[in-house]
Amino acid sequence: SASHSARLVRQARNDLLALHHTETVLEMSAPTWAAASEGDDKKPLNADSREFWAAASGSDVKADSPSWAGPPPEAGQQPQRANEGGPSIARQALMLRILNIGTATMLSITSLIVFIGSVNASSAIIALYVWLFAMLLCCFEVHLAAVANFLLSKFGFIYKPVPRVMFMLLIAGLSFNLGILGWVSGGLLVFSAVATTFLYCTYPEFREMQYKVAEADLQSNAMAWARANPEQAASMMGQAYRYSSQSGGSANV
């Protein structure tokens, strides 16, 4: 009986070793996609489920996750629909700029013709004013660096949208006294003023563009003045640095 018991113990031990070896071989030979993930509480995949076949095909599709519930595409892959409704604000601003340049050129030519052929002083003075205002508007729209300094120092109001619209309406009212071409030019100026007001009140981007134009002209004006007056510019920079240092020291105290 003792030998029989020892034989049973040895057989049971061999069976346990064989079972452990079989489990080890199965774990080593199992594919990676058939193993449960760490966040799934070690739940096995069912062969009849969508997760099983999605994992077998190498896909990340979940059974309970529809296609519209996935993450959005990258920013560069999103369709550009900002400009589908019409031309962009930059293009509209460029069109208004070209319209103002053309209208100012037409007004300057018309006013010169009326000034040369005028028979009384009133028409000559009106034509002269229209010519000066038209040239001022044309120089502003062209944005010449040589003229920007003069415009900023003498006619800074033209860089603000509301005073510029009022100025354009003033030119249009004066141009109505210059005949047929004056009426056409005045009508174009009124249209441009209305369009400028609409863009300014509707689109914040248009206001930012106007501010950037004024800021660029101010920077060019400051740089031109610094190049023309290097000693004064250095002195002003030193004073500003000392003032900022004193202000920072008093704030720390």
Image (cartoon, grey):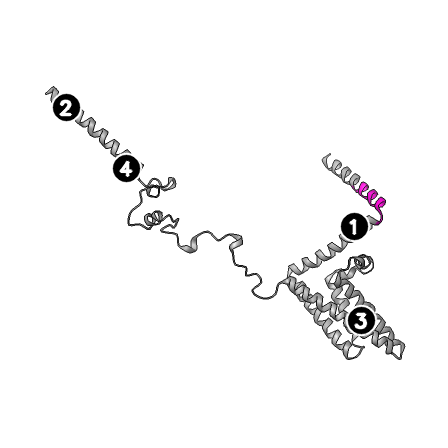
Which quarter of the rendered picture does the C terminus lie within? top right
**Residue type, label 2:** Arg
Q: Is residue 139 left or right of residue 49?
A: right
Indicate the amino acid at tag 3.
Ser
Residue position for label 3: 108
Q: Secondary structure at mark 1?
A: helix
Q: Is residue 53 left or right of residue 6?
A: right
* Vertical placement of residue 38 versus 174, above or below: above
Magenta-drawn stretch, dominant element (helix, strand or loop)? helix
Neighbour class for label 4 at 10 Å: few (<14), some, many (≥20)?
Answer: few
Give the magenta part as a residue range.
228-240
- Does 18 sit above or below residue 233? above
For the residues labelled 4 and 3, the Cα–Cα distance comes to 93 Å
Q: Which residue is found at the position 84% from the left and 49% from the top?
A: 228
Q: Position of residue 219 (x, y in %)?
A: 76, 52
Name the side, left or right, on which 165 lies relative to 69. right
Q: Is residue 231 magenta?
A: yes
User: First in sequence: mark 1 or mark 2?
Assistant: 2
Quarter placement of the N terminus = top left
* Earlier-in-chain disc, 4 versus 3: 4
Residue under the point 61% across and 65% down: 87
Q: Amino acid at mark 1?
A: Met
Q: Nearer the viewer, mark 4 or mark 2?
A: 4
Q: Image quarter for residue 247?
A: top right
